[in-house]
Image (spheres, helix red, strand yellow):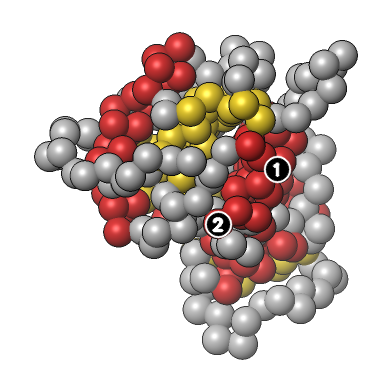
Amino acid sequence: PKPNPRTRQGTTSLVTNFGKFSQVIIYGIHSCAEALKFGRCKKLYLQTGKSFRDLPVNCKCSVMELCESDILKMIPKGAVHQGVAAEVADNLYYCDITDFSATPENCGIAILDGVTDPHNFGAIIRTAAAFGLSGIIVSERSSCRINGTVAKAASGGMEHLSICVVKNIASAIDRLKEYGFWIFAVCESGKQSINEVSLKGKTCLILGAEGAGIRHLQKEKSDFIVRLSTSNKFPTLNVSNAAAIAFYELSKQNGSV
């Protein structure tokens, strides 16, 4: 069981820096529909001859019909657009770490320590939203940023949680501890399985980069190092799959879904 909750021990300085905001083209029915629902879209692009049932009646963004060749010029090669794309400002999805100071008691967030693949990032966002996590923290220098590929993989999940970009993950962990969060590093070296520890209360799960894993300093700052119960013969999982298992266990314990 966890010891008594921490008492706040003053405030440390942690500067977040989102960098230069930019316009991002997202695509796909689910990602665009959710962005429209939450008022994120500046412009909506519909392929000529395609219907889009999720267009809100009170849609305030401009809507433009384009031929498919013009839509394909706006998105990555080979991307599946489903006849719809939208322009959004990426800063609409970012928050400051101080936003996590007033989270409810049973709150889950995740730190992605160096996850750079946009498909993995988007899949993790989608899973985090599905299991009721409140937010995701990433590093400014060593992580993927929001783009169309991330939004497509997230399938609308970006609209349902906060994404925080910080200069230093270790400092972010210190700040979260001040806010009353317990920090769990999820990696193969954990002595306990994640289902053997209590994840109730304010909980932060750290997931490491593809290949490199969680950095040493982040492990040192964690309250617990836990592993997933996988086969001894082949224990390795893709980070997005590992996130799904960890988030499910978290949601099951704290009743967020």
Crowdedness near tag 2: few (<14), some (14–19) or many (≥20) residues, C-alpha within 10 Å: some
- Which three-letter amino acid code belongs to the residue tagged 2? Asn
In the rendered image, is residue 20 in sight?
no
Residue for badge 2? 254
Q: Looking at the rendered structure, which numbered label has been put on residue 66? A: none
Going 84% across and 22% down the picture, which residue do you hit?
Answer: 231
Under tag 2, what secondary structure? helix
Closer to the camera in the image, 143 or 73: 143
How many residues crowd around disc 1 within 10 Å: few (fewer than 14), some, or many (20 or more)?
A: some
Residue 214 at what x, y percent from top left?
A: 53, 19
The answer to whether the residue labelled 2 contacts the one labelled 1, judged by CB atoms less than 8 Å apart, is no
x, y percent for residue 147: 57, 42
State which tag comes first along the sequence, 2 or 1: 1
Question: Helix, strand, or loop for circle 1?
Answer: helix
The x, y position of residue 199, in whole percent, is 53, 45
In the rendered image, the quadrant that contains the C terminus is bottom right
* Front residue of this view, candidates 140 and 82: 140
Name the residue carrying label 1: 244
Out of 53 and 67, give the one closest to the viewer: 53
Q: Is residue 13 left or right of residue 229?
A: left
Q: Residue at (43%, 35%) from the top-left corner? A: 183
Vertical arrangement, residue 83 with respect to residue 26, above or below: below
Q: Report the amino acid beneath label 1.
A: Ala
**Residue, far left:** 10
Q: Quadrant of residue 239?
A: top right
> Is 182 left or right of 230, judged from the image as shown?
left
User: Would you say residue 82 is visible in this rendering?
Assistant: yes
